[in-house]
Amino acid sequence: MQTMSLRMPDYLKIAISDVCKNEKISLNQFILNALSEKVSALQTVDIIESKAKNASKEKFLNALSRVPNNEPLENDRLDIKI
């Protein structure tokens, strides 16, 4: 594990400290969670973009044609009133 210094504006430090106090977590844990979430989001975008390069309308329609056209189960129904 490595240690690093971080510079941030006072207003942000105060806001984060308030959140940490309310959530009963350390500042370190908050920053680790925030960084982890950001890295995960960026990696997800990379994965989706990579898969999109291999996508085609033909492949999509082929996969869609194999989906059965059944009525949804009672618990899966959406009661949308238009």
Image: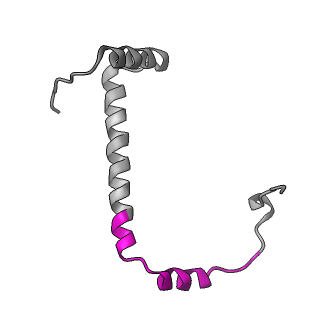
Image quarter hosting the C terminus = bottom right
Q: Residue furthest right?
A: 81
Give residue 63's position: percent from left, percent from top: 54, 81
Give residue 8's position: percent from left, percent from top: 26, 21
What residue appears at the point 49 percent right and 16 percent down from the top-left corner? 22
According to the image, what is the colour scheme of the structure? one colour
What residue appears at the point 61 percent right and 85 percent down from the top-left corner? 65
State the image quarter where residue 52 is shown.
Answer: bottom left
State the image quarter where residue 71 is shown.
Answer: bottom right
Image label count: 0
Dominant secondary-structure state across the stretch colored magenta:
helix
Q: With 65 as the anchor, is 9 left or right in this view?
A: left
Q: With 9 as the anchor, is 3 left or right in this view?
A: left
Q: With 60 as the anchor, is 14 left or right in this view?
A: left
Q: Is residue 77 above or below residue 12?
A: below
What residue appears at the point 41 percent right and 21 percent down from the top-left corner? 25
Give residue 37's position: percent from left, percent from top: 38, 41
Give residue 11's position: percent from left, percent from top: 35, 15
Q: Which residues are drawn in magenta?
A: 49-70
Image quarter hosting the N terminus = top left
Q: With 34 as the anchor, is 22 left or right in this view?
A: right
State the image quarter where residue 33 is shown.
Answer: top left
Q: Is residue 81 above or below residue 60?
A: above
Q: Is residue 68 magenta?
A: yes
